[in-house]
Image (cartoon, rainbow, N blue to C red):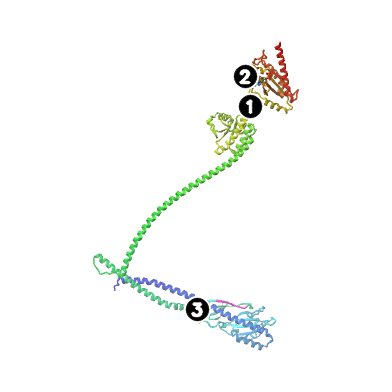
Amino acid sequence: MRIKLSVFIALLVATVAVLPASVVAYMFYQQMHIAVEQTTKQNLALQSSLTGEKLTYRMEVLLSGLALFAREKGEAEFELSTKREINNRLRQFLNTYRIVNSLYLLDAKGQVVTGIGAAKKHVIKENFAAKPEFSIKPEPHGSFIFFDNSQLVHSVENPYGVAIITPVFNKRHELTSYLLSIIPSQDLPQLIGKHSKQFKVAFYHQGSWLAGDYWEANADINDYIHDIDIGLPNYGNLLSVSIHIAEPADRLMFAVEEAMTPIYGVGATLCLATLLFSFFIARYITASLSRFYQHINSLQAGVKDDYHPKFWVVELHNLYQIFNKMQLTIGQQLSNLQSKNSELKQADILRQQYLSQVESLNKELEEKVQERTQTLEETLKLVEESSVVLERVIRYRRELQGLDNIAVIELTLKYLKQSLPQMDMALIIQGDRYHQAAMKQTQAVFDLEQVLNKSMALGEEQWHQGVSALDDGTPVLRLGRNGSGLGCLALKQMPSSQFQHCLLMFVKELGSYLEIRKLTAELDFLARTDALTQLGNRKLFDETLEGFETQLDTEVGLFIIDVNGLKQVNDNKGHEVGDALLQKVAELIRHCSGGITDKCFRLGGDEYAIILAGDELKQSQTLYKRLLEEQPKMNFAFDVMGGYSGFSCSIGFASTANTIFSMLYSVADQNMYQVKREHYRDARTKKMA
Ligand SMILES: Nc1nc2c(ncn2[C@@H]2O[C@H](COP(=O)(O)OP(=O)(O)OP(=O)(O)O)[C@@H](O)[C@H]2O)c(=O)[nH]1
């Protein structure tokens, strides 16, 4: 039989469609099985719990009954009753609680007094206390005893039972006796009443079967164990019982089957419906596709056919056109998107460039700010240092006052070394012994003579405001203003500009100090020098003489020399000639006192003075003699009082050897006038002669 292609494809599609349905059905079955199993287990747990609750409740009712009975009977003084009365009461209790099959009264030592029950004839005569399982404990509280005694439970098949020992107290709370209740374990199921036939129930104590259904544990049985402990506060131990409850496996299977039955039907129907639906749909689609294919072939072959497309083919065609349009639109959108993307990328590149520019500008700015901050910090530091240097300069200025050149050099170098401790330097001050001090400071470093000569030889244009350099490169700083030639500071290396500034401050200070000192010295000299004769003037004379006033052990001698007839010279020859005469006299005095003393003065007008002190006095005669001898040799002739020519002086002398110091001048002056008078007398005599 030939099967059409469309039918074959439809069958294939239907089969493929049914497969997942079968898998789903199988999984559903599995899940159902697990669910039923879990439900069964939960049911078993519930049942066993319920059973335990029931057993506990019934046993507690019984125990409470026993306690009540013991209290009532204990207070009614059991021991006072006859055995018959006691038995009647025990029987009444048994009738109320039928689960107890025997009830005995024991005395306080555990000896059976009397009792009612199935095993009465077996145990009544025996001593319960002697049996290990019934040993009465010394404590006056109740206890549970599991035993294995077919006689007591009156059953050979199931010899197990539970004995309950309940203490009995009298009104004075004294233990008088015990009640012994026997419960055969075979009666335990009665306590829980009827239970569903679908479950098996059994009671165990410490792994030993007591009562109920007995079954071997195996895989086909679902069972559940529930342990219960029953007890009351006045009991010394607990009644421990395990309740085993089970449901056979075939029951579980049955339950699963039962649950699945309707689903099987639904599943099968679904599968069949899927099969049929898939088949017809596939058949329909393949048939129309095949007709469509034939139509295309006919079109290609140029054959006309009466093809009418099915509505879904039209729909498909429409769908295709929609897709086509969508494709076009989406393509356009995509190209738009692409161009936007490229624009965005371009913008991104520009942004990146801008950002990097901003970043580099920021960096530059940061560097500038840092640079500025550094400069500022340096300036601040400089200002700080400058103020420190300024303080030092002020201190230096104070300390400079009144020092000689050596001390000045030492002090200056000490201050400069504070700022430039590592720098070798030499300070040269023109004048007295400058180089010894400088050499001391910088012995092996400079050739001071050479430095001085070279620095003095520097032309004005080579001197700079700051540090100048010699031809060998030695840095030098000049002391004082242009042309003052006070000296210089020579350095081994060129200092940094910061230190140059510091050095300049000190050097300027030193220069101005030296200049002032020099000017002061010049002024001083001028103030104490006679301008015409260059001898010391009256002021210097007074100071010199006063200087000796306090030197009491030094002998002082004084010559007063006065020119004779100066007025006439002035009058006759003119003032210039008078001046020349005064200068000649000064020369004479300087000449005669040479090698003896340099303390020669012009006191004013035509009056001169020579001071001798100490050893100089030894040559006073020599000096006097020289003055007398040298006067006529002076080549200065003029007429005095019309006829007299030649030059002469009147000389007076006094010494502290023969007069007091305060009278020294006036004595010398008087002596001089005495000589002058004699001179004029002689002159008059000569003239008259
Ligand atoms: N050329 C000149 N004459 C002076 C100077 N100082 C004072 N005289 C003059 O010296 C003269 C001093 O006169 P006197 O005291 O009489 O001295 P004298 O003429 O030498 O007479 P005797 O001292 O008595 O010998 C005065 O005429 C002064 O004017 C001076 O610096 N130059």
Q: Secondary structure at mark 2?
A: helix
Type of the residue with mark 3: Glu
Q: Is residue 663 left or right of residue 58?
A: right
Per the rendered image, the range of residues in magenta is: 226-232
Report x, y in % for residue 421: 59, 38
Q: Which residue is mark 2?
A: 576
Q: Is residue 362 left or right of residue 4?
A: right
Q: Nearer the viewer, mark 3 or mark 1?
A: 1
Snapshot quadrant of residue 638:
top right
Query: Around disc 1, counting alpha carbons within 10 Å, would you say few (fewer than 14), some (14 to 19), or many (20 or more)?
Result: some
User: Quadrant of the image for the N terminus?
Assistant: bottom left
Q: Which residue is mark 3?
A: 247
Residue occupying the point 56% across, 39% down: 498
Q: Nearer the viewer, mark 1 or mark 2?
A: 2
Q: Is residue 286 above or below residue 480?
A: below
Depth order, front residue of 277/217: 277
Q: Which residue is mark 1?
A: 526
Residue at the far bottom in the pictured view: 84
Q: Is residue 209 visible?
A: no
Ligand 1 within 8 Å, label 2 CB = yes
